[in-house]
Image (spheres, rainbow, N blue to C red):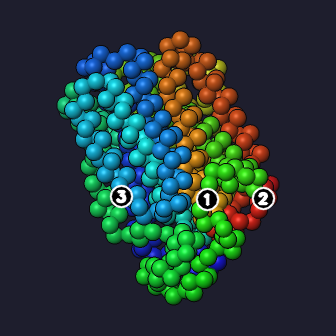
C-alpha cells in the first residue's frame, strides 16, 4: 500500500473535508439534544404522558441502531459517495415535517427516520475522512468529529433557551424544525470536497480512478497498484461475518463495549438534563435548568480539547483507561449522596462531562483505525448501532428510574455501567498512535501497551 496518503502534507483540502464530514455528528448532537428543550412545551400542548416522553426521547436512538447496522454494510459495498448527501436531505425533510406534527406517534416516527439518517452519515463520513487523513492528523481530526457533536448539542440548548425565552413554550415546533437550517449549510459545504475515498476505489478494482483522485486533491502522482491494500484479495466486499471472525472479534467487542457503556449515561444525561437538575432542587421548566444543561454540554465539549492532543502524545490506550476510571467517581458520589446541594450536584455532572473527553474523541477514532478498508464502514456502523442500544435504554429508563427509584439508585447504576466500560478498556484497548492506517488495521492482534 502506498504511503502517499499517510505521509501527505496537511492542507486546506483536509480541513475542508473535516468540516464537511463533521456535519453528521453536529446534526446528531443537535437533533438529539433539541428534543430536551422542545419537550418542555410539547408536553403541555400534546398532553404527553411519561411513556410518551420516553418514546420520543428514545425514537431517534432506536433509528440509529437500525440505520447504523444497515448503512455501514451498504457503505462498504457500494461506496462512501452514494449516500454522502442523501442522508442530509432526509434529515432536513424530517425536521421540517416535525413543525406540523400533531400526534405523539408522528413525532416518534419522524425522529426514528432522523436517527436512521444520522446513523447513515457516520460510516460514510468518518470512513471517508479517515481514509484521506495523514497519520499525524488522523487522531486529532477523527476526534474533532465528536467535538462537532457537542457543538451541535450546545447549539441546540442555546437555541432552545432563546426560543423558550422569547417565543415561549409554543416554540417547540420551531425548535424541532430548526435542524433543517444546519442540513442546508452542510449540503453546500459538501459540494466542495472529495466525494469518494481512493482507498475504497482501489479495493474495488478502480485503482486508476483512485490514483487520479489522489493527484487531484493531494497533487502527487502515485502508482495505482500501490493503492491496493496488501491483504485485500477476495475481501473487497466486507461482511458482518468477517467483522465478528476470530481475527477482528476482540476489536469489535471492545469498540462496541466501551461506546455503549459511555453513551448510555451520556445520552440520558443530555436528553433529560433539565429533569436531572430539577431533582437537585432547580425549578423545573425554567431558564435555569435549560441553561444549566447547555453548560454541562459545553463542559463535555471542553473535555474533548485536551483529549484530542493527549491521544497523539500520551497515546490512545492510557487516555481511554484513565478517563473511564475518573468518570466513575462523580456519578458514584451523586449515587451515594443524592441529596447534595444543587451547586455541588451540578459540579459533579460537570466533572463527569470533562473526564468523558477521552472516550469521546476515541468513539470514532478506534473503529476507523482497527479495521481495513473493506469492512471499516461496517465496523463504524455496528459500533454506532450497538452503542445506541445502550443510549436508547438509558434514555428510555431514566425518567422511570428517577420517578420510581430516585436519584441515588439511578446514579449508582450509572456508576456500575461506567465501571464495566472501564474494565472493557483495560481488557481490550490497543495502542495505534503514530501507526499507518493499513498497519493499524492489518497487523493482527495489536499488543496492549502498559
Q: Residue at x 39, y 20 (%)?
A: 52
Judging depth in this view, the residue of 193 and 450 nearest the camera is 193
- Assign a secondary structure to mark 1: loop
What residue is pinned by disc 2? 445
For marks 2 and 3, give the CA distance: 36 Å
What residue is pinned by disc 3? 85
Quadrant the C terminus occupies: bottom right
Q: Say above or below: 28 vs 3.
A: above
Foreground label between 1 and 3? 1
- Which x, y percent locates residue 174? 23, 36
Q: Residue at x 58, y 40 (%)?
A: 386
In the current view of this chain or complex, which residue is farthest to the left?
167
Foreground label between 2 and 3? 3
Earlier in the chain: of badge 2 and badge 1, it is 1
In the image: residue 421, left or right of residue 64: right
| Mark 1 residue crowding within 10 angstroms, few (<14) / some (14–19) / many (20+) | many
Residue 238 tag number: 1
In the image: residue 43, left or right of residue 140: left
- Assign a secondary structure to mark 3: loop
Amino acid at each position: 500500500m502506498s504511503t502517499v496518503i499517510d505521509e501527505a502534507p496537511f492542507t486546506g483540502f483536509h480541513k475542508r473535508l473535516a468540516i464537511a464530514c463533521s456535519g453528521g455528528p453536529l446534526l446528531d448532537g443537535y437533533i438529539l439534544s433539541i428534543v430536551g428543550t422542545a419537550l418542555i412545551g410539547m408536553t403541555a400542548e400534546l398532553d404527553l404522558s411519561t411513556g410518551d416522553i420516553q418514546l420520543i426521547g428514545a425514537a431517534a436512538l432506536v433509528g440509529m441502531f437500525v440505520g447504523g447496522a444497515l448503512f455501514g454494510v451498504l457503505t462498504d459495498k457500494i461506496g462512501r459517495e452514494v449516500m454522502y448527501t442523501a442522508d442530509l436531505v432526509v434529515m432536513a425533510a424530517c425536521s421540517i415535517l416535525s413543525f406540523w406534527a400533531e400526534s405523539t406517534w408522528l413525532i416518534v416516527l419522524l425522529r426514528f427516520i432522523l436517527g436512521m439518517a444520522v446513523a447513515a452519515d457516520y460510516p460514510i463520513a468518518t470512513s471517508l475522512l479517515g481514509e484521506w487523513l495523514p497519520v499525524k492528523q488522523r487522531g486529532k481530526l477523527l476526534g474533532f468529529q465528536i467535538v462537532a457533536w457537542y457543538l451541535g448539542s450546545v447549539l441546540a440548548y442555546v437555541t432552545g433557551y432563546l426560543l423558550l425565552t422569547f417565543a415561549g413554550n409554543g416554540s417547540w415546533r420551531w425548535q424541532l424544525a430548526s435542524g433543517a437550517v444546519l442540513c442546508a449549510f452542510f449540503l453546500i459545504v459538501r459540494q466542495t470536497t472529495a466525494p469518494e475515498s481512493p482507498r475504497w476505489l482501489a479495493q474495488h478494482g478502480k485503482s486508476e480512478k483512485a490514483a487520479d483522485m489522489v493527484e487531484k486533491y493531494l497533487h502527487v502522482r502515485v502508482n495505482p497498484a500501490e493503492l491496493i491494500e496488501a491483504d485485500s484479495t477476495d475481501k473487497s466486499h466486507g461482511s458482518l461475518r468477517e467483522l465478528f471472525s476470530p481475527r477482528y472479534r476482540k476489536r469489535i467487542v471492545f469498540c462496541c463495549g466501551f461506546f455503549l457503556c459511555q453513551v448510555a449515561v451520556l445520552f440520558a444525561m443530555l436528553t433529560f438534563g433539565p429533569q436531572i437538575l430539577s431533582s437537585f432542587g432547580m425549578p423545573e421548566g425554567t431558564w435555569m435548568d435549560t441553561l444549566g444543561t447547555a453548560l454541562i454540554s459545553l463542559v463535555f465539549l471542553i473535555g474533548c480539547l485536551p483529549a484530542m492532543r493527549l491521544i497523539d502524545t500520551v497515546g490512545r490506550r492510557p487516555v481511554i483507561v484513565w478517563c473511564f476510571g475518573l468518570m466513575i467517581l462523580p456519578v458514584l458520589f451523586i449515587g451515594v449522596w443524592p441529596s447534595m446541594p444543587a451547586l455541588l450536584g451540578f459540579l459533579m455532572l460537570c466533572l463527569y462531562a470533562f473526564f468523558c473527553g477521552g472516550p469521546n474523541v476515541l468513539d470514532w477514532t478506534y473503529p476507523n483505525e482497527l479495521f481495513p478498508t473493506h469492512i471499516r464502514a461496517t465496523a463504524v456502523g455496528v459500533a454506532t448501532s450497538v452503542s445506541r442500544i445502550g443510549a436508547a435504554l438509558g434514555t428510555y429508563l431514566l425518567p422511570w428510574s428517577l420517578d420510581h427509584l430516585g436519584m441515588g439508585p439511578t446514579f449508582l447504576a450509572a456508576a456500575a455501567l461506567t465501571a464495566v466500560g472501564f474494565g472493557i478498556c483495560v481488557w481490550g484497548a490497543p495502542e495505534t498512535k503514530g501507526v499507518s492506517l493499513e498497519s493499524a488495521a492489518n497487523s493482527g492482534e495489536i499488543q496492549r501497551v502498559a
